[in-house]
Amino acid sequence: MTDQQIYSVLGVGFGPANLSLAVTLEELGWTGRSRFVERAGDFQWQDEQLIAGADIQNNPFRDLTMPRDTGSRYTFVNYLASQGRLTDYLHLNTKFPLRREYAGYLRWVADAFRGSVDYGQSATRLSVVDTAAGEVFRLETGSGREYLGEKVVIGTGRSPRIPAVFQGSLGSSVFHATRYLGSMRRLKGRDLKVAVVGGSQSAIEIVLDLLNRPDVGQVVSVQRGIGFRLKDTSPYSRRVFLPEFIDYFYPLPSEAKQRIRAELRSINYAACDQDVIDRLASVQHEYELMGSDRLRMMTFSEVAEVTPHAGGAVNRLTVRDVHHGTLSAYDADVVILATGFRDFGLGPDDEHYHPLLEGVADRLALNDYGLPAVARDYSVPVKQSYGPRPLRLYLNGLCEASHGMGDAGALAVLSARSTDIVESLMLEPDAVPVPDGRPTADGLLTERLRDEALR
């Protein structure tokens, strides 16, 4: 038993997803006690990828709150006005804001909620415990702190995807793109040879940034395809980022969802914007005119093996042509993995669920594939033994498989998703939907749902 304070809502992670949730809780009049736990020492968003010139690829009007409330004090437009930069921004006539500018906006909003967040607390385990008030969630952190909550919203973002061949080599010279800028600052030396693995927007941005660094002697881009591909930016394809598409996508059978995701993959994955492709193609052409090999493209290629070389100072990459099977070697001082993030699913690179859910996995309702059964309101039913109120667990920004590509880290649906979650939090227990989209007649965890959760 414990006498710790029990929060009505406990948020894990305080990036854009749960920041939008905090805004929505305030603006929709939530009166319960809420607390957010964030592992970083202060608010940050893509700090490791704030590369000069990089933009956000998202209409700034689709911010944390404007799609729901144009009069909100937390809009991007209000941020610019508060900084005295609205006129300058409008004068630029730019389509998308710079990533650095949008990071400033998010930090400005986060400052308004500083009293609701405990920074520097890395969540390590989630479980269910008994209290005098009934069963509640218990969140443990690496510093030894514990938090209790009736409802938990996981908004940590997805785990980086590390291809199996690199998992034993991670360190100061082999790292994921989410550690890019900090890792490069710590590297010392001249004429570094750097390999960038992947064909994503992050990959091409990193290649361009490396070519602007005087201490980088050569950059090699290793990717399985023919080269950097153009992102599908058609307004028809990008309907996947509209709230209306979620309503269409969610009820579909799993096979149809998988087919749609495969068909529309180039909207968000392994594809790049026209401007960065044009910049890199121009740079590459100029190097060719000069007879320089400072930029090398290893296309239709994958890394088959990574071994230390030259006394451990260099990573020797064995690179295989994906069609001919021929092998070649490349020695790189630094290897950067622009390989994206792991989905929830049954694929070889997928996770069955977020690692933090391991401690409550036996209580979660599962679908036919053994994955958490996520309802339309982003909740996962939790089996409960006793208590006056049902436990509720929400996945905020982790539901691409069930809700579509808008959940793949997209800023465009933040406001709509947080609205769905908060409206669900404010519902009476007998109105909360279950994973088939229908409300229960007598509470979230009826006997029928208890049985399903145990299967």
Image (cartoon, rainbow, N blue to C red):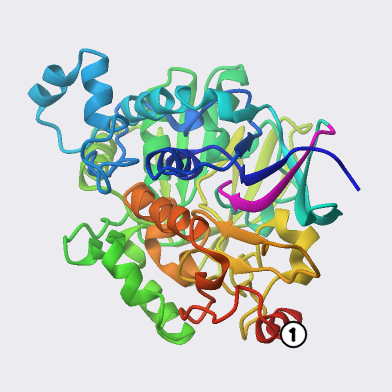
Q: Nearer the viewer, residue 335 or 374?
A: 374
Badge 1 marks a residue whose secondary structure is loop
The answer to whether residue 369 of the structure is visible from this angle is yes
Residue ID at (91%, 48%):
1
Q: What residue occupies the far right of the structure in this picture?
A: 1
- 426 sits left or right of 138 in the view: left
- 51 sits left or right of 357 in the view: left
The residue where tag 1 is placed is 455
Residues packed near mark 1 inside 10 Å, few (<14), some (14 to 19) or many (20 plus): some
Rendered image quadrant of residue 359: bottom right
x%, y% of residue 277? 26, 45
Q: Is residue 221 above or below residue 247?
A: above
Magenta: main secondary structure: strand
Q: Nearer the viewer, residue 441 or 449?
A: 441
Amino acid on which disc 1 is placed: Arg
- 315 sits left or right of 343 in the view: right
x%, y% of residue 321? 51, 64
x%, y% of residue 413? 34, 53
Residue ID at (30%, 41%):
63
Residue ID at (63%, 82%):
369
Residues drawn in magenta: 144-156
The answer to whether residue 269 of the structure is visible from this angle is no
Residue ID at (52%, 69%):
432
Q: Nearer the viewer, residue 315 or 446?
A: 446
